[in-house]
Image (cartoon, rainbow, N blue to C red):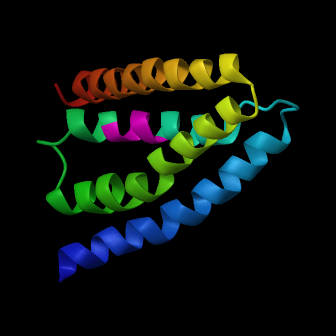
């Protein structure tokens, strides 16, 4: 039960933060490209990579709270998919392909960077 509560607590913070961050970032761009979703997914990937690299140094509860709960609620594959399809249907096909490509490359890059930073700290 404690594990479930940790995941719920992380989600309670991550979900509204995703919404607020998405709206704040997107409002600063006059573009069809989904910068808000892209940004939260990259930040979430960085955090998750950091946690993965530090998994032996952190308590399991932190991984559940931050990794599963917070990052799970902060990042969003479904919105990424929906926005990509929306771009494609709106004939912004270059932006749809750019969204997929940039999200994969930047997401993986962020995970690797997070792992590298945590391993540099904890060895």
- Seen from the viewer's position, the closer of residues 106 and 101 is 101
- Seen from the viewer's position, the closer of residues 41 and 61 is 41
Residue 106, compared with residue 59, is above or below; it is above
Q: Quadrant of residue 115?
A: top left
Which residue is drawn at the image coordinates 84% and 44% (left, top)? 27
Residue 107, compared with residue 5, is above or below; it is above
Residue 39, compared with residue 16, is above or below; it is above
Q: Position of residue 121 (x, y in %)?
A: 27, 28
Residue 47, compared with residue 98, is above or below; it is below
Query: The C terminus is located in which quarter?
Result: top left
Which residue is drawn at the image coordinates 32% and 21% (left, top)? 112
Q: Quadrant of residue 32?
A: top right
Q: Is residue 14 left or right of residue 92?
A: left
Query: The N terminus is located in which quarter?
Result: bottom left
Q: Is residue 75 visible?
A: no
Quick check: is 122 in the magenta stretch? no
Q: Main secondary structure of the magenta part?
A: helix
Task: Work out which residue is located at the far left of the displayed protein and give it.
Answer: 56
Count of numbered tags: 0
Which residue is drawn at the image coordinates 35% and 62% (left, top)? 69
Q: Position of residue 114 (x, y in %)?
A: 35, 28
Q: Position of residue 3 (x, y in %)?
A: 20, 73
Q: Is residue 4 visible?
A: yes
Task: Work out which residue is located at the far right of the displayed protein and give it.
Answer: 30
- Seen from the viewer's position, the closer of residues 36 and 2 is 36
Q: Which residues are magenta?
A: 44-48
Q: Position of residue 19 (x, y in %)?
A: 65, 58
Q: Quadrant of residue 10?
A: bottom left
Which residue is drawn at the image coordinates 53% and 63% (left, top)? 15
């Amino acid at each position: 039960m404690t594990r479930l509560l940790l995941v719920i607590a992380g989600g309670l913070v991550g979900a509204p933060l995703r919404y607020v961050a998405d709206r704040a970032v997107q409002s600063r761009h006059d573009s069809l490209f989904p910068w808000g979703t892209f940004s939260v997914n990259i930040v979430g990937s960085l955090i998750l990579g950091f946690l993965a690299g530090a998994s032996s140094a952190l308590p399991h509860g932190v991984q559940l709270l931050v990794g599963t709960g917070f990052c799970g609620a902060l990042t969003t594959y479904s919105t990424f998919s929906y926005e990509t399809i929306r771009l494609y249907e709106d004939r912004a096909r270059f932006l749809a392909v750019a969204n997929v490509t940039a999200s994969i490359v930047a997401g993986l890059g962020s995970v690797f960077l997070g792992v590298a930073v945590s391993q540099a700290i904890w060895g």
